[in-house]
Amino acid sequence: MSMQINKYELNILDASLFRSLFHWQMANTKRFRQVFTLVFVKSPESPEMKQILLEQMRTSDLLFSFPIGEPDIILMANTGEDEADVFIERLRRTESTRSYRVGVSVIEIRNGDATLEDVLQVGNDSVNRALQLQGDTPYVKDRSFRKLERQCVRVSIIEDDPVVTMIIQKLVERISVKQLDLDIQVFRDGQDFIESNWYQSSHTHLVIMNDILPRKNGLEVLYALRELPNMQKYHIFMMTKRKSEAEMIYAYQYGVDEYITKPFNPKLFESQIKKVLRRIYHG
Amino acid sequence: MDKILLSLLLVIVVLLIILFALFFLLVFYRIQEVKRKEAIGNYIEDRQIDWYEYLFGDGFSHVALKPHKNLELEAIDELFFRIIYNFSSDEINDKVNAFASLYMSDYYSKKLTSRSRELRINTLNKISLFNLQFMLDPVSSLLEKKKKYSKTELLLIYEVLGKFSRTDFVTHFVAPKIPLGEFDYKKLLMELDEEQINLLAEDFNVLPELLQLTIIEIIGVHHYLDWLPLLHQCLDNPSQEIRIRALKSIAELEVANSLELYESFSHSTIWEERLMTAKIFRFATTEEALPILERLIKDPNYLVRAQAAKSIKSLKNGHQALYTVITMSTDEFAIDVAEEMFGKEY
């Protein structure tokens, strides 16, 4: 006798597993800055409702079934609140097939310091708030956990002229981006940088380097960083005296984020760095 | 015999003494040089933060940076070079100028009149790089001296004059002290702004031919549309080179408003003129350009044919016109070049 598995069965889990999966997801958020969304759904306890939820979810989402009286929770990994709108819209389309109201609360989590207790509290409160609103599928979006925690970005300046290094360091120090701390380290050449373990940390890295350097030049450093498995966390600025378009295209192809031609305007340089830091902050 | 040996020994001793003296003198100079470089390095290391505050910050007074000895002037000169080589802004430029005009005017003037040619060239290069406008008079006065300057120096002097003087440079560019080549003129004229080019080209017909050619080229490169009438005038010039360059610049200006003027060049016996005409007709309307380009695509010269095909392709409905050439033309060379435009896909 063959056993048939309902295609949705794998997406529904017992509430007792929520704690472990929440902590695992939080670890990812903290380490890799992965955003995820929790959707709290409160409705009368019925197997039909669970089936409706499962049908509207994506295959990558997980539904945690909580005891009667508590809202069920859908975990949407790598998902922002905007993408969760699709789920709400699909749930609203089921209004004609059901006779009861379903309250929904959407919580996007970006802050790796949020605790399970806080999240559950906010989720319960907001889903109850949603049920006080009009409509058959009232929903609220709670943004308490969208704010990022303070983050440290490591800045490496690789330049052989100490005067230029000092000026770049001062210019970078002048930049302030909310919630970002900059930890700056200078290197005299590419070899020094590659031999250090400074760039191997889990931080997001901003590398500002000259293209011509003694021992290992800028392009060699670029290749080395782009070979790493987690290369996305390195934001690379290359400074050059050469103005050849072909070389610029070549450098961009190999993963330079910004190419600055010397001599450059210090204010423009600051703006470019600030732009990248803001991009880091907003994920 | 002994006397000869003694004299020989004496000569050897004297030579050895001279060699040792020279050796010690060289060692002494080397030590002095190392010490000088070390002192410059120390100054830069000690004062770089102050210089940063002055050049990149607000409100730091230059009085605190006033140099007291020659070595400090040399160190500041090196610091300026390292900063200006890497950073550029009007603010930095103004501050460098303000400081140098107050404290370094004599330092640079003295170097300009140095006996060493390398030192003079270095100084002229720095005056140009640092945009030291207050050095215009000392640099101009070099030309009044009877002293013979090398071509490199004269070119640098002209470069400084072109950069900092609004009118004085014209006389020197028109009648340079040494004959200048086209490349030299190009280097000088690329730095001039439109107003200066206007001034220089005022008496275009009396200028040396090489300068005329360069001005024509610069008009095209910088897209100075106001000079289109001058380019038209050049088309009647007896010099073949001037006519070709004028046509080239007209093509670069990307205008085609006097087509009847250019059309006659499509019949020229000089292939370069036909080539440039094909280039100009890229910007005409399809109706006006097509009859000319369809003739030029059958030209005996490959480059003219290729340019005509390229120009047809860039016209409105140009692809269609090229297909027509491929399918209808009896000229195999024209068909070939039209096919090339489509990467030989037919």
Image (spheres, rainbow, N blue to C red):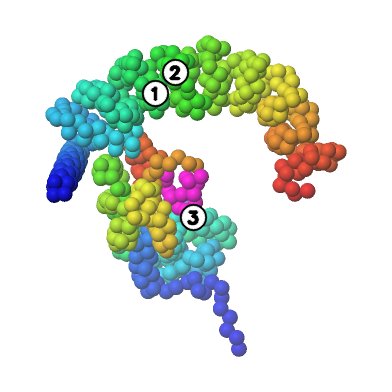
Q: Left of B340 or right of it: where is B8?
A: left
- Residue A179: give x, y in percent of width and height: 29, 49
**Chain letter behind tag 3:** A
Residue B176: mark in rendering: 2
Instruction: Give the spatial CA distance, label 1 vs label 2.
Output: 9 Å
Which one is in front, A159 or A133?
A159
Which secondary structure lies at badge 2? loop
Instruction: Give the spatial CA distance, label 3 vs label 1.
Output: 68 Å
Quick check: is A250 in the magenta stretch? yes
Q: Which residue is mark 1?
A: B154
Q: Which residue corresponds to the image point at 69% horizontal and 18% vertical from the top-left?
A: B258
Q: Crowding at label 3, few (<14), some or many (≥20) Cα neighbours within 10 Å?
A: few
Q: Which residue corresponds to the image point at 40% horizontal and 59% vertical from the top-left?
A: A224
Residue A83: mark in rendering: 3
Which one is in front, B116 or B20?
B20
The residue range painted magenta reads A246-259
Q: Which residue corresponds to the image point at 53% horizontal and 67% vertical from the top-left?
A: A59
Instruction: Say which quarter of the image contains residue B249.
Output: top right
**Chain letter behind tag 1:** B
* Circle 2: residue type: Pro
Instruction: Say which quarter of the image contains residue B163.
Output: top left
The answer to whether one can see residue A5 in this image is yes
The answer to whether one can see residue B312 in this image is no
Q: Crowding at label 1, few (<14), some or many (≥20) Cα neighbours within 10 Å?
A: many
- Residue B132: give x, y in percent of width and height: 30, 24
* Circle 3: residue type: Glu
